[in-house]
Each structure stands twice: as C-alpha cells, then as structure tokens.
Amino acid sequence: MLKIEKINKKFGGLHAIKNLSFTIEKGPISAIIGPNGAGKTTVFNLLTGVFKVDSGKIFFEDRDITNFQSYQIARLGITRTFQNLQIFTNMTVLENIMTGFYLKSKQNLFHSMFRLNLKEEKFIREKSLELLDILNLTQYANSDTKILPFGILRQVEIVRALASSPKLILMDEPAAGLNTFETDILAENIKKIKDLGVTILLIEHDMNLVMKICEKIIVLNFGEKIAEGKAEEIQKDERVIKAYLGE
C-alpha cells in the first residue's frame, strides 16, 4: 500500500531523515518508534506533504506521490491525527465530525454558510452519527467540545479522521496524555478501525500499547532505520535496546 524508497530530508545542517526505506502493507497495524528527535513526526510530515523530500520516492498504491500537495494526498486516501489536539472548540462533537466529510462533499463554503444543499447535509449528519456509534461516542454528539475531557477529545479527532473515508490513517502519538483506562479504550478503538478495512500507521511512545496491537514495528534513531519487524523481534534487537528500550 505505502512504499518509501531512500527518502532524505535536511533542515539546514541537520540531516533529519537519512536514506529511509520501508513498506506498509494493507491491513496490519504498524508503528514507527524511536527516541525523541529520531525523525518520526518528520516522516509523517513528508508522507502528508507538509514537508517536501530532498531525494527519494514515496509511493501509495503504486502511484508516485513524492512531493504531492497535502490536499492531493488527502484525496487519495491518506489522513492523519496530530500529537497536539486539532479540535474546533467552538463546535459540538457532531459538528467536528461533519467537518471531516469536507473532502468528499460537493458543497463549497457558500453552500455551507447558507445551507443550500440540505439533502447532503442530512446525509453527512447521519454518517457522522454512525461513526460516533462505532467508537461508542454517540452520547457526546451534541456536547460542546470545550467541556469534554482530553481522552474523549482524542477519540473525537480519530473519528473525524475516519469521516474522509481514508484508506490509511497516520496517528501521531494517539496515547499521549491518556491514562491507562483511556489507553485501553484507544487500543480497542484502533482495532475497530482496522476491522473497517482502514490501515493504520502510528507513532507512539507507549510501548505497552505498541506491543499489544502492532503487527509491524519500524525503529528510527537519528533519522535512520535501525530495525524493522514483529514486536517480539524488536524487543530482542540489541540495537533497539541500546538506542531506545533500555537495558
């Protein structure tokens, strides 16, 4: 599904990503891990067109998307969530989810402001409620996001990412700021998303979560891949233990 071939990215004198290659197959949940500064979020920014690669290639479903614009990549079926919440605090939960349908909507801003396409608006509302129900968030549909706890808002952001009918979701530290109970709920919801046929690639520091749900793990250190494999293989890799997991 996703193929990265020897990509490089420099910021001034810093070589942030060095000859990085990996593939993500359709279906399995995968993760990119590594210490702070390893280049993980930079990889996501390259995959979603926020940054442009200096060299190398990025392929999605056998199509070369190297240095595509962010909106082009999103329309092909790649979406993401962020380490820092990106929620519209002046909207309800349901309204936040409805904004996620924008890429698939036929409405422009003028239509939306004056509600000229009520049939499509009704369809988007119904589909948004269906997505909330899948992740057991229906009870919060009409809640003001300003009053909801952080853990719920994390789930809302993930549901909104689903609204654009993605083929691949990139999740940047989805468990950041969550307690153990909330992380367990997150794990179950990620599995539910996988069951919908959506492929997931996440960046995560919570090793319990990664080892529990991920079928493939890629390890970065100083912008380079130092290991790749299944959870049990990564746990035993001496390079990973030394660089990240600890003795």
Image (cartoon, grey):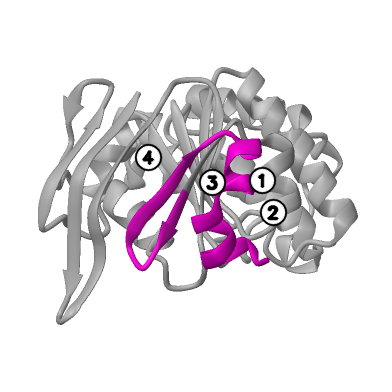
Q: Which mark is residue 29?
A: none
Which mark lies nearer to you, 2 or 4?
2
The residue that mark 1 highlights is 210
- Mark 4 to mark 1: distance in Å? 43 Å
Q: Is residue 141 visible?
A: no
Quarter holding the N terminus is top left
Q: Across the whole image, how many numbered discs are drawn on residues? A: 4
- Mark 3 to mark 4: distance in Å? 35 Å
The residue that mark 3 highlights is 202
For the point 81% across and 36% down, the residue is 138
Residue contact at pointers 2 and 1, CB within 8 angstroms: yes
Q: Amino acid at mark 3?
A: Leu
Residue occupying the far right of the picture: 181
Residue contact at pointers 1 and 3, CB within 8 angstroms: yes
Mark 1 or mark 4, which is nearer the start of the sequence? 4
Q: Amino acid at mark 2?
A: Met
- Mark 3 to mark 2: distance in Å? 12 Å
Mark 4 or mark 2, which is nearer the start of the sequence? 4
The residue that mark 2 highlights is 207
For the point 77% across and 47% down, the residue is 142
Q: Characterize the local packing of mark 2: few (<14), some (14-19) or many (20 or more) Cα atoms within 10 angstroms.
A: few
Residue 228 in magenta? yes
Mark 2 or mark 3, which is nearer the start of the sequence? 3
The magenta region covers 219-247
For the point 74% across and 35% down, the residue is 189
Q: Nearer the viewer, residue 121 or 18?
A: 18
Which mark lies nearer to you, 1 or 3?
1
Residue 94, horizontal then vertical, whole percent:
67, 43
